[in-house]
Amino acid sequence: MASDDALASKAGAEVLARGGNAADAAAATLLALGVASPASSGLGGGGFALYYRARDRTVWFVDFRERAPAAATATMFRDDAPREGAGPASRPSQLGGLATGVPGEPAGVEALVMRFGTLPLDAVAAPAIRLATEGVVLAPYVANLSATFSAQMRRDPLLRRIARAAATGARLRQPELARTLRAFAKQGRRAIYSGPVARAIVAANRRRGGVLTLDDLERYRALGRRPLSGRAFGFRWFTAPPPSAGGFTLLSSLRVLERIPAASRALGVGRLHALAESWKGPFADRARYFGDPDFVDIPLAALGAPARIARRAALFDPDRARPAADYALPLSEPSPAPALQREHGTSHLCVVDAEGNVASVTTTVNLPFGARYTAAGIVLNDEMDDFASAVGETNAFGLVGGAQNLPGPRRRPVSTMSPTIVFRDGRPVLCAGGAGGSRIVTAVEQVALHVLVDGMTAGEAVAAPRIHEQGPPGGLEVERSPALPDATIDALRALGHDVSVVDHLAVVQAIAIRSDGTLDAASDPRKGGAPAGR
């Protein structure tokens, strides 16, 4: 198995060794990530899980994305200006009580174990409880993030302790989180969504200007959805449906790419140019059409129609970059659907077990340390920043907001999380996913192509330098790497790309499953994770 923290990977491997399956190991890893990687994950966040059940060869998707409180309104972040002197990511949608949506991870972990697992929840939670009780030495990246957000973290007692431990390398014990995890191990989601933990969450949220209620927590449910799937490059790809736009972006880009002549998308400058162009259209679609599918109509069939894909492929020019607007190809204006009656700080993990089950799970508290406050040992998310503050405004990841994704009561914001499982001839051959906001899907696609098309090992594919393009207001981001020399960057600029060089783009975990059944697992060196196995 692979995750972005070595201790969390070991927790998952421990559960596999005790007879658990991929779902049990994924749940154990999620809980351990909340202890060892509090900047990225935890019970105060949410995510998506894609699961392949080998016994009946079916693929399932669990949506445990955070949800807006019932008191949320479309205009609540209309004046979403950064707070003067408050440090980075200090908009009301990013810092404090209004930034927090209803956490989904407790329901998501329980759903994985109850629907697909083989072990009781207390056995699955045991490694995380032990880590919280005995303490962990935090990874170096946590120290870097703590330094960035130090002024904000000093205002919360637990975050202050985390920052101090990260800076000094001291072992961090989290007794309050251990108590919460023990309650969760006995009672499941009820331990978080009702009772003393729920009251602590609501009280902490209200003290910071939030609008969460006990009723918001009690009403939360993880949802089963049909995964998106499609064929490209001779493989069948399963990935995240709305409210993620990541899966749609992945499949759309792949379908455009395979229609481009092979010589024009060969590994090198041609591949980078073709990838960048293939992303412009889907990101424009995201801004215009995507929202919570339980509240708005998303015309997926029309957006992904073969004729529309073919038109985008035909627009590709190997000799120049086109403006993103050329690829938009707008449909008629979408309209809200009736509401249904059902109710980088990110981490990804991949698990493959001995029976052939596969779990690809992405979890997040959104920005590092979420909204930068805690309750009952839990870091609370700032997922409300993934809504559009106003039409045309950008969020922390530079994504342009559309009317479909404005906040509203009990809505789930659009995401780019893209847990993915790829099949050939009915057999899983790759599990992949990543962390990094809007950069997730482009990174996952590049890693997958490196493994499946270019013949790289998982480790080579994950370590390879990457690019990212999501259309205006940004340009083409290129990782700083000896493997992407100045000559490559100059060639991309000569094609008309507005290139900026960045330190790194996203963090990917991947497991390639060879034809003989052996596994090739890789964790991204950009975050210092490590795979583990039985």
Image: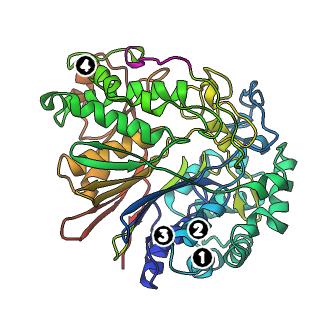
Residue under label 2? 31
Name the dominant secondary structure of the magenta segment: loop
Q: Amino acid at mark 3?
A: Ala
Residue under label 1? 125
Res 297 → quadrant: top right
Where is residue 299 drawn, in percent x and y?
50, 30
Q: Is residue 329 magenta?
A: yes
* Residue at image location 42% in from the left, 61% down from the top: 529
The residue at the far left in this view is 263
**Considering only order in the chain, which callout, 4 or 1, is on the residue closer to the N terminus?**
1
Classify mark 3: helix, strand or loop.
helix
Q: Amino acid at mark 4?
A: Ala
Q: Nearer the viewer, mark 3 or mark 1?
A: 3
Of residues 320 and 299, which is closer to you in this image? 299
Q: Which mark is residue 314?
A: 4
**Considering only order in the chain, which callout, 4 or 3, is on the residue closer to the N terminus?**
3
Q: Is residue 484 magenta?
A: no
Q: Magenta residues, as a range?
A: 326-333
Q: Is residue 505 visible?
A: no
Classify mark 2: helix, strand or loop.
helix
Does the CB distance between marks 3 and 1 fall below 8 Å? no
* Residue at image location 59% in from the left, 34% down from the top: 291
Label 1, residues with CA under 10 Å away: few <14, some 14-19, many ≥20: many
